[in-house]
Image: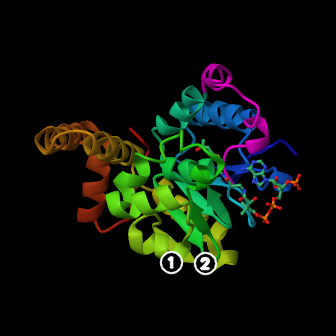
Amino acid sequence: MPVVELEHPGRGIARLRIHRPDARNALNQEVRQLLGEHFAALSADGSVRAIILTGGDKYFAAGADIKAMAEAGAIDIMLRNTHLLWRTIAACPKPVIAAVNGYAWGGGCELAMHADMIVAGEGASFCQPEIKVGIMPGAGGTQRLTRAIGKFAAMKMLLTGLPMSAREALAAGLASEVVADELVQARALELAELIAAMPPLAVMQIKEVLLAGQDASLDTALMLERKAFQLLFASRDQKEGMQAFLEKRKPDFTGQ
Ligand code: CAA
């Protein structure tokens, strides 16, 4: 089995599963490379409407692979250019749901934060323990975490390396839902199916505007929202969605 497997669990849905159980799904360069390649391909695949990102039933990912970093120098780390691989995930225009069981630690927590929704199992934990091995997060942990849960909760996680349980993560805003461990995959699939049945252009515009707006002034973000809202009136799916409502029937969205 490859260290990242692509599965097609339903119509319009792709699932990427990290599989390095002996290393608690730690992210080595091969995993990052494959994730980057898959995300680039899925972003360009018109038949894909939602993506599930998971580490399977036991571990999401216990961070960057420490064995592959322990002896590295600053230039080695720089030349790995991992930010280019992460960027492909961040730039994915399709909705991404992280299905998290077990550890989402270090780079694993950062990976989950690249997703648009996080479904966590009761036994999942989120942690940025980099400080304990002498470094700090390098794939968005200081920034996406702070945007998600605010300064004081983020500082606590980052400076102490203490884990957060799934329930705490939900309360803090680091998870969308918490379900029983054995229901994580099914619930993520259910949500992906729900989104995959929505008009894809509206889905993409919502994702793009929400993310871009987070880094803009309120005025600029509201303008982005307004422009995208107006643009959707050029879509066939807007006509279909509203007509179906008026005719009291189910809409048939085609992505046009
Ligand atoms: N890198 C490399 N190997 C890892 C790993 C990691 N991040 N996490 C676990 N492993 C390996 C262990 O070395 C061990 O391998 P061996 O059997 O060859 O000894 C195997 O996975 C099982 O690990 P444990 O016995 O420790 O399993 P556990 O269930 O008792 O504990 C754990 C799990 C709490 C996650 C613990 O493994 C742990 O603390 N891992 C390190 C977590 C960490 O520090 N992550 C941050 C990494 S730095 C980073 O991510 C930088 C960044 O932001 C980009």
Q: Does the magenta stretch include residue 67?
A: yes
The magenta region covers 62-81
**Residue 253 shows in the view:** no
User: Which three-letter amino acid code belongs to the residue tagged 1?
Assistant: Arg
Quick one: quadrant of the C terminus? top left
Look at the numbered disc 1 and give the secondary structure of its residue: helix
* On screen, residue 97 above or below 49: below
Q: Name the residue under label 1.
A: 167
Question: Quadrant location of residue 47?
Answer: top right
Q: Residues within 10 Å of mark 1 (few under 14, many from 20)?
A: many
User: Which three-letter amino acid code belongs to the residue tagged 2?
Assistant: Glu
**Residue 209 shows in the view:** yes
Q: Is residue 73 magenta?
A: yes
Q: Is residue 133 left or right of residue 140?
A: right
- The circle on residue 122 is 2
Image colouring: rainbow
Instruction: Pinpoint residue 48: horizontal percent, then vertical percent.
Output: 57, 43
Please say if the residues under marks 2 and 1 sit with CB atoms less than 8 Å apart: yes
